[in-house]
Amino acid sequence: MYRFALKVYGCQMNVYDGDKIRSALVARGWREASEDEADVVVLNGCSIRDKAEQKVWSDLGRYGERWAREGKPSVAVTGCVAQNVGRRMAARFPWVRFVSGPRHIGVVPEGLERLMEGEREKFFHLDDDPRAFLDLPGATVERVNRWKAFITIAHGCDNFCSYCIVPYVRGRFVSRPPEEILAEMRVLVMDGVQEITLLGQNVDSYGQDLPTAYSFSDLLRAGVDTGVRRLRFVTSHPKDFTPDVVEAMAERDDVLCPSVNLPIQSGSDGMLKRMNRRYTVEDFRRIVSLLRSRLPDLGLTTDLIVGHPGETEEDFQDSLAVLREFRFDLVHSAAYSPRQGTAAALWADQVPRDVSMARLNEVNELQKEIATEINRALVGRTVVVLLDDVAPRGAGMLQGRTPSDKVVLVEAGEELLGRFVSVEITRGESWCLTGRIVAPAE
Ligand code: SAH
Ligand code: SF4
Ligand code: F3S
């Protein structure tokens, strides 16, 4: 029996792939262990910014000592980071013995077994065909979270935003057949999953490449019929967002959660154009009005980049202005990080790092104020929360999420994990809510 450890970095797509790898290995008789005991450490890493890659490099350095002593662990680098820099990692560290990109997840279990059985050469699964995809069939029955699960509904991305590595590492946009997704959902529901999040870099274009007419809102409606208690999705691209999705959400608000991540990236039309985003702030405004008029309890989050090449002080002020205007519940903010191979990395007008960092601070300060105001205004409200994990701090505390996807901390025993409860909000801070359970919600 072989032992594996699994570390996952990056977005929910990587978490899903990690859960798939874990499920497949466990099904073959492998056991999950700590890094210190594992025969193989699987590092499923991200490449979105330099910092994400550095995390994997720094992990890799740490295995040398045990490798010298015991000849273990062999390291498998997978995910987007593998596609981007896996060869370099394998060249630098002898313990990196297996490298496969996110489009070759299907080769991982068997490849790792061959490694354990003594194959000596290093394994590389990184072919350049951006349409090739080797999946791992089956649902994620061995998950990081027992009550919540992710399902990728479409692989890759065709948008080629100026700054972004995703189309290069995850390849072309390919929708998975609806039957396959729905079958996976049913297995998860049987396995006790209460909440499913459908994943894609651009879920709004789901189905456009399928042989028969089938849209994202069709998938949402069919998803509701699988019997899952809560259904969510990320990420929506403003250029492809369609009103039928809002209609489906309004119609089935008992299951479809009113939470949308709509990445704006910049508040300046000039920047949006250079970023190749293909919408304007006015387009974005129209979508937000529609969402907020139809879904009064909507949780709206966004992604924003500061310091993209060519970003002037005026462009930056426009970004602060959209934060004030739209009052997002949460902003995933980032300082631009040049990614080799993308268009923007080659542009001459790079913004100095200290300017980007100062802008990032300013964004975070402003957003903290806005989120605090929004969350304080929720004090006294009663919301239904799915208790999905123990809270990171404080014994006897659980955490859960509101339908709008806000984190709520409550005092509760672990026997309530996986349950829906009604919670009265007693405190609101910038990043989370605190409440007390007033009734079971079932
Ligand atoms: N598909 C989603 C985003 C996926 S990447 C969309 O279209 O919005 C997640 C986030 O990482 C992006 O929204 C962006 O804000 C950030 N990001 C991507 N590339 C980046 C880069 N080179 N530097 C800094 N942030 C980046
Ligand atoms: Fe990247 Fe743009 Fe695709 Fe999002 S839509 S994954 S930002 S290329
Ligand atoms: Fe990172 Fe790949 Fe996701 S680069 S953000 S893990 S799609």
Image (cartoon, rainbow, N blue to C red):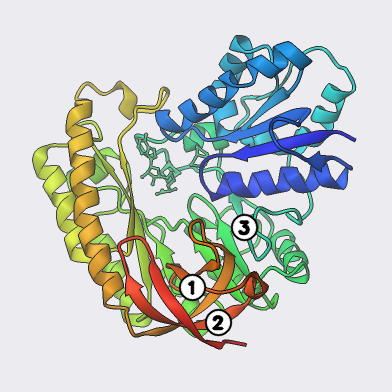
Taking 95 as reference, is 133 above or below it?
A: below
Q: Decide: marks 1, 2 in contact (CB < 8 A)? A: yes
Taking 191 as reference, is 22 above or below it?
A: above
SS at mark 1? strand
Task: Kindly identify the residue that appears in the image at 61 percent across and 65 percent down.
Answer: 196
Label 1, label 3: how far apart the Cα atoms are: 24 Å
Q: Is residue 164 left or right of residue 12?
A: left
Q: Is residue 319 left or right of residue 51?
A: left
Residue, disc 2: 421
Quarter where residue 296 is shown: bottom left
Few, some or many C-alpha atoms within 10 Å of disc 3 (few <14, some 14-19, many ≥20)? many
Residue 122 image point, x, y percent: 74, 15
The front one of 69 and 72 is 69
- Ligand 3 lies under 8 Å from the Cβ of mark 3: no
Q: Which of marks 3 and 2 is nearer the N terminus?
A: 3
Taking 32 as reference, is 309 above or below it?
A: above
